[in-house]
Amino acid sequence: MTFPMQIPFNNTYAQLPGHFYARVLPEQAPSPRLIRINEELAQQLHIDPEWLRGPEGLAMLSGNSVSQGSEPLAQAYAGHQFGNFVPQLGDGRAILLGEITDTQGRHRDLQLKGSGRTPFSRNGDGKAALGPALREYLVSEAMYALGIPTTRALAVVATGEEVARQEGMLDGAVFARVASSHLRVGTFQYFAARQDVVALEALTRFALQRHFPEALAAENPALALLEQVIEVQGSLIPRWMGLGFIHGVMNTDNCSISGETIDYGPCAFMDSFHPKCVYSAIDRGGRYSWGNQPGILVWNLTRLAETLLPLISKDDDEAETLATNALDRLGRKLGDNYHQVFSEKLGLPTEGRISRENDAFIRQTLTLLASQEVDFTHFFRRLTQTVSSEEVQGSNLAALFKNPSAFAEWNQAYQQLTAPSGARIDAMRHSNPVLIPRNHRIEEAIQAAYQGDFVPFHRLADAWQRPFEDNPDYADLQAAPEPHEIVRQTFCGT
Ligand code: AMP
Ligand code: MG
């Protein structure tokens, strides 16, 4: 017998003024079935995993019952989509059930994605297909295990209902997402577009309280907020790049205030390296390619800065100067963090000032990988093995290159740099994963799931919890795709 469990919701967003959101109830799922729950995360949220697995947990996760204390709502936000401003987007297929203080005292949002229409749905059905829900589960949890700030996956439930998508009728699903908040650059843009300075002030206070409470006492809270977002996002994007991650839709509504990676749509991890690599089928101009991501972040945070100008100073010129100075620091921060990430990956010294020599070497390395179409993950992993003598297989690394003399030339340059040892080898081990969520594996698992076979999905979810371990059970998941397996395009699936 299960007992009704109270989720200790503690909702602060619902206390903001009414035009910040729309109160809305999730739609009913005809015959919900649990696919997977994340027990470790449930425990962090004071939710009993056994309860969550049971009928009441399933009713909550599918949207079929609203738990006590939950105040479901859809958040309003705007955003630039591929550079075009849309003054109203909002949660069109997501409903915030409420907030929970986790075991570490942090405020977390619990949101259902795909639980039906809201006032922000426009022409959409508010639903999610199983494939994108499984994809978000796998990739967000893998990102977490890879040490990248990200929203988390609490559960995925099949609804028993079909949804109409371009590919035809697909099984529907609800994805339960946990985030430190769902505030986006687009949330600020929503109120700025309405010239609602009072709302912007309330939102700034809310964001500082939630994410950067130490900055609440700052002399200029709006500037402090901008600086904090610059700090967290300026560290996030270089870390994506160090894993070959391409978000795919870095629209301002998918750029979080918390610095967590959010919205896993047509995202992908690169197999063979190229800085212009793009997977998203809708990104025809390469706006969100691997190498464009820092520039896009600067663009997105410039949009954030614009929304904050009236709060930064009543004097327009002063506001602009302060914001511009902060954004200049973002450019430098991105450069420094990128340098740090790739120095670690290559085992180069990271202490002290940025060395021009290392910078040039990083560039030389990536140019070589691109021209030789080398698998990004294999290169750095094998380099780690080679320098740590885990396997004495220098040839293993060389084998990745089509042109042996190009490798030899690079290797000679590498040998001339100070050889990594001790802490630097440890850093390489922690920044060069054995496993990444390869696209062809995700696709394979999604296709199997549509056929009713969830074994591949669960296997990937298990394997990707320990991406730095060389586990022989998952040796096959290390492999790059065979030519016929390569996935060249990914889709939003909305
Ligand atoms: P995204 O590209 O996933 O970040 O979504 C952009 C906007 O489209 C957001 O406002 C979403 O809520 C909305 N949206 C995406 N898919 C759907 C859907 N199936 N039904 C309603 N709204 C949607
Ligand atoms: Mg989005």
Image (spheres, rainbow, N blue to C red):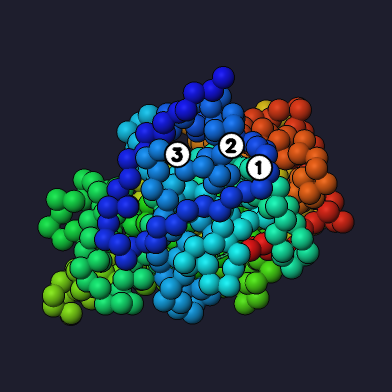
Label 1 environment density (alpha carbons within 10 Å; few <14, some 14–19, many ≥20)? many
Q: Amino acid at mark 3?
A: Ser
Pointers 1 and 2 in contact (CB under 8 A)? yes
Q: Earlier in the sequence, mark 2 or mark 3?
A: 2
Task: Report the residue at 21% width, 50% height from top.
Answer: 215
Placement of 283 over or under 159, stated as above or below: below
Which residue is label 3 attached to?
A: 67
> Considering only order in the chain, which callout, 2 or 1, is on the residue closer to the N terminus?
1
Residue 40: give x, y in percent of width and height.
Answer: 52, 29
Residue at point 19%, 58% (across, down): 221
* Quarter of the rendering containing residue 45: top left
> Disc 1, ligand 1: is the CB inside 8 Å?
no
Near mark 2 (Cα within 10 A), the count class, few <14, some 14-19 or many ≥20, is many
Closer-to-camera residue (262/62): 62
Say what secondary structure mark 1 lies in.
Answer: loop
Quadrant of the image occupied by residue 75: bottom left
Residue highlighted by disc 2: 58
Residue 205 visible? The answer is yes
Q: Position of residue 286 (x, y in %)?
A: 61, 73
Tag 2 secondary structure? helix
The residue labelled by disc 1 is 32
Looking at numbered disc 1 in the image, what kind of residue is underneath it?
Answer: Pro
